[in-house]
């Protein structure tokens, strides 16, 4: 097993991904500041070429491969954004890529991955089932797996966000990060706590099917049942043999907040109406937690707005205040 990422690996990642991933802006949100009673800044990973932060980790992992590994091609398991990022990074390097996705991943994300030249394989109804096809391709075809979060190079790539945050605002007191497999919050927290040990790192997810939150509560990696959610990009397991992200989250994350679907709905709608940001449910959880009264702030706060690759029919309904169906449920704000 490779060593866990360190701060120096984040600086190395920044050099590798320059020219592939974008250094994203940190912009104020007056509406959220008014509600929170503290300065709120939005880190717009929505402006990445692939529409989400995942490009940072994928670009770093692909750039770190040797020539023999590139020749074999890369494969990943993804709820969508990581698959798109791997496809983009691999395509830019002339490397074959396959993305394995579960049936729960929205069609818009599948089409986006295929448009970048990668092959998509739909397998099962969970990331764990899709992972079985990844394992087969690694064993039978010697492809190189680039996991969506539990990989040292991927974590280091996502952690470059933390470097940028403190370069732009050294006085940050709180960083609010969407929580899925822990690669994003783990990488950011690694940078943040090394640069400013007193900073508060808050991770936010949905209240059903949040694997990392359940694992942290249990004190060990656990399995959860995946369910349809507006925050679909935060779904999926963390792996019972998790190598890096569980420990990073356990050690470096200060608070975990869970939101119901109506709260996420209101967060998406508010970001669009007040800040003119088109976003996935998974990237609206920071603002949603403020609106729900579940997140109290005191001092400059950065919120990671992690991705824009939302099903636009669903988003249009949310923006208009219309109900949306999630499996056997109907959600409205």
Image (cartoon, rainbow, N blue to C red):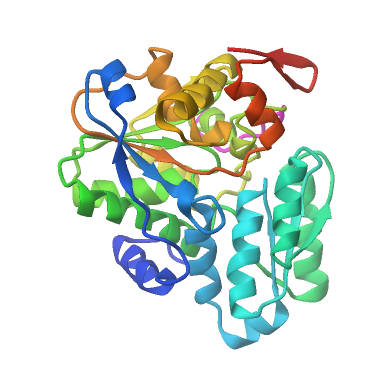
Could you say where residue 158 lies in the image, as x and y percent from the top left?
Answer: 43, 55
Task: Give the magenta range.
Answer: 217-227
Please state if 301 lies on the left or on the right of 316 as rendered: left
Residue sitting at x 55%, y 28%: 214
Q: Quadrant of residue 12?
A: bottom left
Q: Quadrant of residue 280?
A: top right
Observer able to see residue 131: no
Q: Give the camera-side residue of 156 and 249.
A: 156
Residue sitting at x 34%, y 41%: 252
Residue sitting at x 21%, y 33%: 300
Q: Residue furthest left?
A: 171
Could you say where residue 62 lies in the image, as x and y percent from the top left?
Answer: 56, 72
Please state if 184 lies on the left or on the right of 92 as rendered: left
Q: Is residue 175 magenta?
A: no
Residue sitting at x 59%, y 30%: 210
Could you say where residue 165 lies in the image, as x and y percent from the top left?
Answer: 28, 49
């Amino acid at each position: 097993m490779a060593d866990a990422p360190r701060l120096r690996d984040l600086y190395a990642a920044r050099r590798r991904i320059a020219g592939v991933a974008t250094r994203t802006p940190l912009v104020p949100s007056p509406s959220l500041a008014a509600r929170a009673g503290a300065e709120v800044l939005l880190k717009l990973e929505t402006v990445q070429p692939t529409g989400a932060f995942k490009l940072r980790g994928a670009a770093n992992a692909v750039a770190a491969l040797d020539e023999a590994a590139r020749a074999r091609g890369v494969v990943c398991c993804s709820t969508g954004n990581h698959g798109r990022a791997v496809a983009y990074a691999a395509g830019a390097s002339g490397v074959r890529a396959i993305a394995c996705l579960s049936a729960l991943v929205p069609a818009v994300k599948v089409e986006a991955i295929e448009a970048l030249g990668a092959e998509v394989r739909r397998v099962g109804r969970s990331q764990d089932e899709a992972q079985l096809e990844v394992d087969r391709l690694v064993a039978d075809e010697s492809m190189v797996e680039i996991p969506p979060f539990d990989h040292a190079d991927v974590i280091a790539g996502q952690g470059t966000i933390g470097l940028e945050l403190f370069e732009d605002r050294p006085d940050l007191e709180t960083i609010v990060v969407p929580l899925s497999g822990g690669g994003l919050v783990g990488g950011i927290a690694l940078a943040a706590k090394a640069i400013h040990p007193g900073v508060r790192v808050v991770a936010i997810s949905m209240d059903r099917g949040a694997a990392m939150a359940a694992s942290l509560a249990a004190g060990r990696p656990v399995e959860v049942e995946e369910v349809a959610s507006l925050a679909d990009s935060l779904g999926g397991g963390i792996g019972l043999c998790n190598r890096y992200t569980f420990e990073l989250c356990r050690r470096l994350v200060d608070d975990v907040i869970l939101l119901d679907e109506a709260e996420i709905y209101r967060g998406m709608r508010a970001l669009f109406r007040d800040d003119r940001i088109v976003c996935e449910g998974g990237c609206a959880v920071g603002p949603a937690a403020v609106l729900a009264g579940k997140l109290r702030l005191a001092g400059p706060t950065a919120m990671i707005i992690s991705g824009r690759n939302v099903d636009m029919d669903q988003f249009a309904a949310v923006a208009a205040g219309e109900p949306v169906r999630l499996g056997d449920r109907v959600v409205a704000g």
